[in-house]
Image: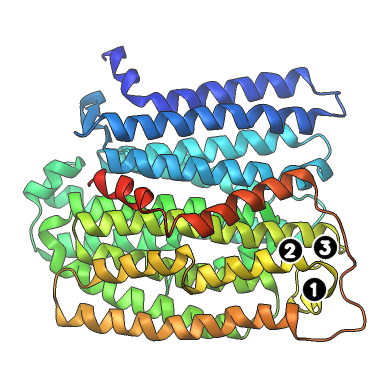
Amino acid sequence: MNYSDFLQMTPEVFLVITLIIAFFADFCLFKSESKTNILGSALAGPLVIVLGTCVLAASNHPEPISAFGGLYVVTPAINVMKAILTFGTLVVVIMAQKWVESQKRLAGEFYMLILSTLLGMFMMMSSGSFLMFFLGLEMASVPLACLVAFDRHRKDSAEGAAKYILVATFSSGVMLFGISFIYAATGTLYFDDVAQAISNSPLCIMGLVFFFSGLGFKISLVPFHFWTADTYQGAPTPVTGYLSVISKGAAAITLCTILMKAFGPMVEYWNYLLYIVIVLSITVANLFAIRQSELKRFMAFSSISQAGYIMLAVVGNGQLGVAALTYYVLVYIVANMAVFTVINVVEQNNGGRTDMAAYNGFYQTNPKLSFLMTLALFSLAGIPPFAGMFSKFFVFMAGVQNGEPMAYGVVFIALVNTVVSLYYYLLIVKAMYITKTDSPLPTFQSDANTKMALAICTAGIALFGVASCVYEWIAAAGI
């Protein structure tokens, strides 16, 4: 083994170093009452370093780089996505500070699990073979189950974790079954070699279907979504936000990469799979979201619908699709994390309530939070001039890039569903501004970390759409 290959894994190396530092800091501060604040503040610096490293790597390495005999492959587009996911993780760490304080001495465990999950996602995205992909996937999934069960005082948290780990185990088994079919047909696990040897044989088609089904569970696409609402409701709110954006973004870009690299010769087959799953995900999730009165379950179905929009970019099977997907994830992170930051601070100041009725008359007592929540919801719905409108536009453009009539039909259905999504997002706006109540939420002061997280997300919602340099930087990274 050539140890110089580790130099190609700079973001992962920095994450491992951060993990080690967090471990020893947690050990040394075991009896300290201020451990939460110290660890949270200390973690922001290394995450900013990882973010900067990913940005520099995406800008300075125009050509793909491989290491360890092709097991690890990194491209500028992957480095861009790593930077975006690191940015999202930084927002989660900032907004979770107040909640982590309530967990007493478990701050170190929370941060180490977050970092371990992010490391697994990095490995998964940079995989050059199905073997490395699966190891990275499990490295990300197991700590996530621990995070879902992190709130020891709520049985919903343990129930959500049990459902998550059972579904994750089942989906991993289905995925391994599909990978075994691919290996039997091609004799290799490396993506580039699979693309050269794969054919339209029944064995390869079944392998594609099982693999797609297994990863569909991770992205919570319909009909593989049944775990999502219960897990999102049971998990602590910062973890729910992390699940809905960071985990989903990593799985989406990985599926896009593998479909294009390994299953490129079978594009006509997985395009039809995508057409069906996209229409089901957007339509079914929107219809179920209308029926929800619990806000975290509501956001769960919203995330399922957003996953359908994300995968619409993959239909184009080209550079525009990758750029549109990456840009959509970036905009989705800032908008969704703004919503979950408001949900988190309201939950902490309202006895743990997350039902939609708790927001009745919210504008009367907390107008600033109501306004920021409205901006985030409008961005999720794709209302101009917010960033969500631009991200949906690029996704629709990528979806019709190949010029297939069926693609135009899928994009039309997605456009119609945008109107439906606007309706159910406006239900929250109606509750905050119009619905009257005799006992609205009391006025409360948000902590400094919450204000910082909301400021970052609001700036992203306002600027990422109109600042063309952001999309140009993503598009320049290529595939």
Give the mark toward the camera: 1 or 3: 1
Residue for badge 2: 369
Quarter location, residue 275: bottom left
Q: In this view, does 23 lie to the left or right of 48?
A: right
- Residue 362 circle label: 1
Image height of 388 relative to 361, above or below: above
- Kindly indicate whether the residue at mark 3 contacts the one at mark 2 (C-beta within 8 angstroms): no
Q: What element carries label 3?
A: loop
Report x, y in % for residue 38. 75, 27
> Which is in the foreground here, disc 2 or disc 3?
2
Distance between mark 2 and mark 1 Cα atoms: 8 Å
The amino acid type of the residue labelled 3 equals Gly
Indicate which disc, 2 or 3, sits on the residue closer to the N terminus.
3
User: Residue 58's x, y, as percent?
Assistant: 32, 35
Q: Residue at x 87, y 70 (%)?
A: 441
Callout 1: helix, strand or loop?
Answer: helix
Q: Can residue 235 be seen in this view?
A: yes
| Quarter of the image where one finds residue 336 | bottom right
Q: Crowdedness of circle 1 by 10 Å Cα count: few (<14), some, many (20+)?
A: many
Amino acid type for the residue under numbered disc 2: Leu
Badges 2 and 1: C-beta atoms under 8 Å apart? yes
Which residue is at a point 39% across and 63% down the rendered structure image? 216
Reading the image, the residue beneath label 3 is: 352
